[in-house]
Amino acid sequence: MSLLLRKKLPLQMTIRCASAAAPDLESIIRVDHAGELGADRIYAGQMAVLGRTSKGPTIQHMWDQEKVHRAKFEELIRKYRVRPTVMVPIWNVAGFVLGAGTALLGEKAAMACTVAVETVIVEHYNDQLRQLMNDPKANKELMETITKFRDEEQEHHDTGIDHGAEQAPFYSALTEVIKVGCKTAIAISKVV
């Protein structure tokens, strides 16, 4: 809103517009909790299929980081008294099925799944960080958490690429379908 336009508005409307631009911390914590739960379950599914293969240690490393992410958002859910998404049971099953299903298609398909999910999550976290920059002092803890996790998600993405994700059969189609699913889950988890 331009300064010129803002001067013409009544004070109450200016304040309402300013607060509407503030990030919705409840929504951010809810959706990130759901996302980290989903990621934990994806890696659990991948480990169920590929845990004893040469990719097992790589997947385990990424899964261990996701477990820390999930624990942190479970802590934030309690600290800020945020209601988790009602979709938790569905994301729990869907995440495991996605992880196991892509792993059954092979190691490269599992890595393609990782690349697709982490591409969406890195973009999602970057969007949230831009929102939180509206008040960096008030949002310091959450910004630090999201920044750290975003960097680890980028590492997972890069690991997937390094481990042959792009050689997976039907890589483009597979990753696009997974990305749409992730974006849909994000949109739903923000509000439900």
Image (cartoon, rainbow, N blue to C red):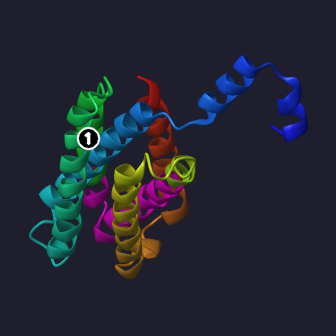
Q: Residue at x 57, y 53 (%)?
A: 130
Residue 34: image quadrant is: top left
Q: What residue lies at 23% left-to-right and 35% top-to-bottom?
A: 79
Q: Residue at x 31, y 60 (%)?
A: 105
> In which quadrant of the rendered image does the N terminus lie?
top right
Q: Nearer the viewer, residue 123 or 103?
A: 123
Above or below: residue 174 compared with residue 158: above
Task: Locate residue 7 relative to residue 108 in the image: left or right.
Answer: right
Specify whether residue 112 is painted magenta. Answer: yes
User: Which residue bears the numbered disc 1?
Assistant: 76
Dot 1, how many residues are within 10 Å of its Cα: few (below 14), some (14-19), or many (20+)?
A: some
On the image, the x and y values in percent for residue 104 come to 25, 58
**What span is colored magenta in the figure?**
100-126
Which SS does the magenta portion mostly show?
helix
Q: Is residue 80 shown above or below 51?
A: above
Q: Quadrant of the C terminus?
A: top left
The quarter of the displayed image where residue 35 is located: top left
Q: Report the front residue among 8 and 17.
A: 8
Tell whether position 192 is magenta.
no
Q: Residue furthest left?
A: 52
Q: Amino acid at mark 1?
A: Leu
The image position of residue 116, as x and y in percent, is 45, 59
